[in-house]
Image (spheres, rainbow, N blue to C red):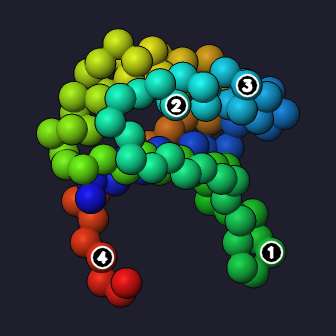
Amino acid sequence: MYRVTIVYNHPADPAAFDEHYSSKHVPLVQQIPSVKRFAAGKCDSLDGNPPSAYALAQLYFESKAEAGQAFASPEGQNAAADVANFASGGVTMLFTDEETVLP
């Protein structure tokens, strides 16, 4: 399984981020072809300190090639272009050819 992780840094306006993300961005991501799993959530910490990032999203694909095709598609391009509309803190994308270590 190939995983794309999007790390969202802390935005200038968290409420605006949350509203745009849930009402506009998630529907765009749901249109990206070949996504096998889409998971997202706000970051937390175990010790009560502020987390280093605001939120994460993870998209899973069968392969790296499939992920590349999905992000190159019109739907993938639309979702990518939308990030600038709400992620004022910036983002980092991580790409992983994931291996299951424990079932």
Residue pictured at 35% horizontal, 29% vertical: 33
Q: Which of marks 4 and 2 is nearer the N terminus?
A: 2
Rendered position, 19 above or below 100: above
**Residue flagged by tag 3: what amino acid is it?**
Ser
Residue pictured at 24% horizontal, 50% vertical: 62
Residue 23 drawn at (x, y percent)? 73, 25
**Residue flagged by tag 2: what amino acid is it?**
Gln
User: Where does label 2 land, which residue?
Assistant: 30
User: Residue 48 bears which disc, if any?
Assistant: 1
Asked whether disc 1 touches disc 3, contact meaning CB atoms under 8 Å apart, the reply is: no
Q: Earlier in the sequence, mark 3 or mark 2?
A: 3
Q: Is 87 positioned to the left or the right of 20 in the image?
A: left
Task: Please tell me whether mark 3 or mark 2 is closer to you in this view.
Answer: 2
**Residue flagged by tag 1: what amino acid is it?**
Gly
Q: Earlier in the sequence, mark 4 or mark 1?
A: 1
Screen quadrant of the C terminus: bottom left
Report how far apart the C-alphas of labels 4 and 1 lie in the structure. 30 Å
User: Where does label 4 land, which residue?
Assistant: 100
User: Residue 23 bears which disc, if any?
Assistant: 3
Q: Earlier in the sequence, mark 2 or mark 1?
A: 2
Looking at the image, the residue that sits furthest to the bottom is 102
Task: Please tell me whether mark 2 or mark 1 is closer to you in this view.
Answer: 2
Q: Which of marks 1 and 3 is nearer the N terminus?
A: 3
